[in-house]
Image (spheres, helix red, strand yellow):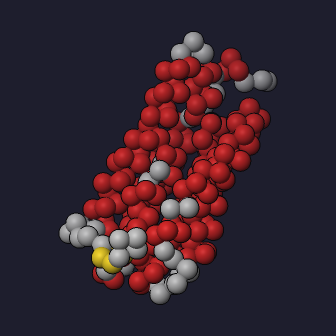
Amino acid sequence: MIGNLYLWGNICQYVSSYYKINQGDPNASNSKAILILPLSFTVQACFNPVGAFLQKKMNPKILMIMGSTVCISSLYLASLMTTWVWFVFFYAVCFPIGVGLSYWTPILCGYEWYPKRKGMVSGIIIGAFGFGAFIFGFLTKALVNPNNLSPSGTDDEKYYDFDTSSRVPRMFHICIVIWTVLMTIGSLLISRSPEYVRE
């Protein structure tokens, strides 16, 4: 779930089409949509140290639940927005806060359990983050564009039709249910090594 910030590359044109075509928002465009990913990474980078600091101070289950709640709530609120600006706020600002809070927790817990295999641990976990976006790339396309239609318009600004882009909120809602299950399982299973927990 955490790696699904990368999913934006797959869904950005569908989302911008939804706000441009379905909601009639003139602020939505593909050229503006490409700015969401660097904005998301910037916000996440600001909160990564906060999550890493809190990992040593609190129960990782609680920290993961807290970060997951921020992620899921932000995505759900983003999916309900009818204007591009508010979508961007919840998707590109609030969602990455939750990712930043959660990102280092599994990695640092893994380091505690396997202190001599830190490279392997971080490789597996960060690889799994990216693999999540890979899998959900196929799922989101199947949900929003099952007929594999192409966008139309000028070379710079191509948009999907009304029917295709109207599936965007449902796409988010289905993914949110799946991500909620995954984040719940992950939050329940994570723990620190007893050797590193101060009494």
Horizontal and vertical percent for residue 87?
A: 56, 72
5 vs 100, left or right, is left
Q: Is residue 168 visible?
A: no
- Number of numbered markers: 0
Which residue sits furthest left?
147
Nearest the viewer among 197 and 79 is: 79
Q: Is residue 40 above or below residue 100?
A: below
Q: Which quadrant is home to the C terminus?
A: top right
Q: Is residue 199 above or below residue 26?
A: above
Q: Residue at x 61, y 75 (%)?
A: 86
173 vs 108, left or right, is left
Q: Residue at x 56, y 61 (%)?
A: 35
Which residue sits furthest front?
155
Q: Residue at x 62, y 36 (%)?
A: 105
Nearest the viewer among 45 and 151 is: 151
Horizontal and vertical percent for residue 16?
A: 45, 73
Horizontal and vertical percent for residue 166?
A: 36, 79
